[in-house]
Image (cartoon, rainbow, N blue to C red):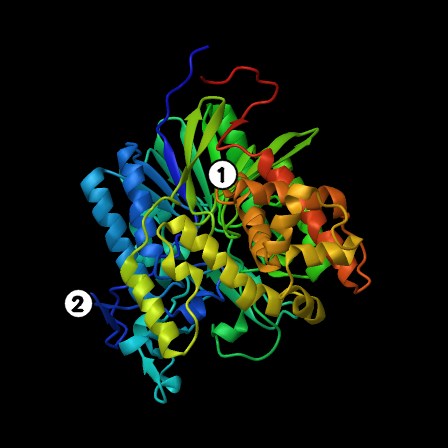
Amino acid sequence: MTYRSFPEIAVIADAHFHDTDADFGFSGIRIGGRALTMRSWSDTRQSTRVFNESAGALYAALQKVEKRGIRHVVLLGDYSDDGQRATTEKLADILQRHSRDHGTAFYALPGNHDIFGLRGRHHTKEFLTEAGRPILVSSDARLAGNGTVFSDRMYCEGYPEGLRPMANFGFFRKPEYIHWESPFGSSDAEEDRLYEVASPDGRNCYRLMDASYLVEPASGLWLLMIDANVFEPLDGAFMHGEEAAFTDSTAGGWNAMLRLKPFILSWIGDVTRRATHLGKTLLVFSHYPALDPFDGACEAEKALFGETNVVRRTPRREVEDAFCAADVHVHFSGHLHVEGVTRRSSDQGSFTNIAVPSLVAFPPAFKVIRPWHHGVVIDTVELAATSVDHRLLEGYRLETAASHENGEAAHAAETYGDFLRAHKRALVIHRYLPKEWPDAIAASVLPMRVAQAVECLAGKGKGLTPSSVVLAEGLPMIELIADWYCLRQGAHLAMAHIEPERLALYRLLADRFGLEPGAQDGSLPRFLGIFFGALGAFLDRATNGRNSVVVRLERDLQDEPA
């Protein structure tokens, strides 16, 4: 069989670019003769992403894109730190320069961190200044003074203003596109791309812009770029378009899309029918997952921790049904910073969601799509071996010294992968345990060694092999918990970062003590049993994962490219 040749496409999700050279109206922290606009470690260790390392990660990803000769790059939302004016404008300059130097075309989608509602929203962030001391910077002038600096460059714009710095990256028609359209037709004018949305009580009504588009960058290849941000007006009395008048899009995703943007699903169905009729290879992208990227493993998380952010953001079955009904075969998503391939089959055909990891969370990676006429091959490109910027590590050490804290493992990391794994450990201590775990359970588990956890379940030494006893006695539970979260997020990409003897111990614990998700009785043994059961599910998912995945775009097709 002869296969049609298409260009490769890089897919970068959740770059969360922060400019360490940004001018937010304060002097920054001087390290090695250079002033850095550096976010604090205090905030970083409580965030599911890192901040200051984002620029280096983006440059490393673009360098790999260049070396592979890739000329088409999808930015799968959350391309900016938090949509700050200064940040988005600097990112656009970087992308424009890369386009000019290497002939690369970028196709962007907005994520929940890039833009907000009609008029935008304020941000207040903690940075480091001289000797590692913290300082707040806010776009809200009312907060200025008492250690807070005002900068309107910190403000996040709304639709359509927030899209304008990124206008050259797919949101609007360009002469070189073979085809471009929006859900509303062929016009790319902002005023022609509005939809109506109202509060549940009908009192607050708005016309908001939807930034979805379909582009044909190469003959026969269609990229369907879906703006899945949903900002629903709230009940009550508000100033027109103010931040408080809207829900945040973060937890909405495709669950909210079905209810508030049904016209997008109709458009998707129309595009898939035309693609089939015209012989186009169609790839679909949005910031939010359309299938559970953890493939059911988060049932245990719900049993353990209740309605966590991950649980709230999991797509419902109705989303899967809608995508199958629209005859979508493959969809690429970001948002949850997770590596995952989830497949579903029905009488209507098969549907695959490819979850693309973030550049600024463990594991750091992006995807490369190699399209062919009847399908796609998807490869993973990792950034874990990238060096860390030692000036940033020095800044963190100055900060911890100024606050009289002990240094953390992340501050001595040599590679980006090691840094992010250590960051995950800090997250466990400063975010997950205090914010998501039951208080009594967290207090009991935090000082434990793994052997003590086993003793709670089976008695001293029971269930362990002689070779595993020594490791279990010396391994703090905090290390196991950090690896639990690394496996949850990284699947097979996490395996190379966890010591083989630990992985063997984890498999033993899961097999001997793991329980299926079920009702909690509040006891530590029950909690640990479900926790180890989830560990087994994460290990299974990791063991079955691959760095290269083939997705067929036609039913019952046996041939695939070499």
**Residue 499 vertical position relative to residue 261 in the rendered view, above or below:** above
Q: Position of residue 315 (x, y in %)?
A: 63, 49
Residue at image point 63% right, 69% down: 202
Asked whether, in this view, residue 534 is left or right of residue 222, the answer is right
Residue contact between numbered discs 1 and 2, judged by CB atoms under 8 Å:
no
Identified by mark 2, the residue type is Gly
**Residue 228 vertical position relative to residue 267 in the rendered view, above or below:** below
Residue at image point 47% right, 23% down: 279
Q: Position of residue 517 (x, y in %)?
A: 76, 51
Q: Which mark is residue 33?
A: 2
Q: Nearer the viewer, mark 1 or mark 2?
A: 2
Return the residue nearer the eye: 31 or 182.
Answer: 31
- Mark 1 packing: few (<14 Cα in 10 Å), some, or many (20+)? some
Identified by mark 1, the residue type is Val
Inspect this view and state whether residue 210 appears.
Answer: no
> How far apart are the alpha carbons under marks 1 and 2?
46 Å
Quadrant placement of the C terminus: top left
Residue topped by disc 1: 284
Return the residue nearer the eye: 544 or 484.
Answer: 484
Residue at image point 47% right, 27% down: 376
Q: Position of residue 94 (x, y in %)?
A: 25, 52
Inspect this view and state whether residue 423 appears.
Answer: yes
Which is more N-terminal, label 2 or label 1?
2
Q: Position of residue 497 (x, y in %)?
A: 48, 44
Q: Which mark is residue 240?
A: none
Secondary element under disc 2, as helix, strand or loop, is: loop
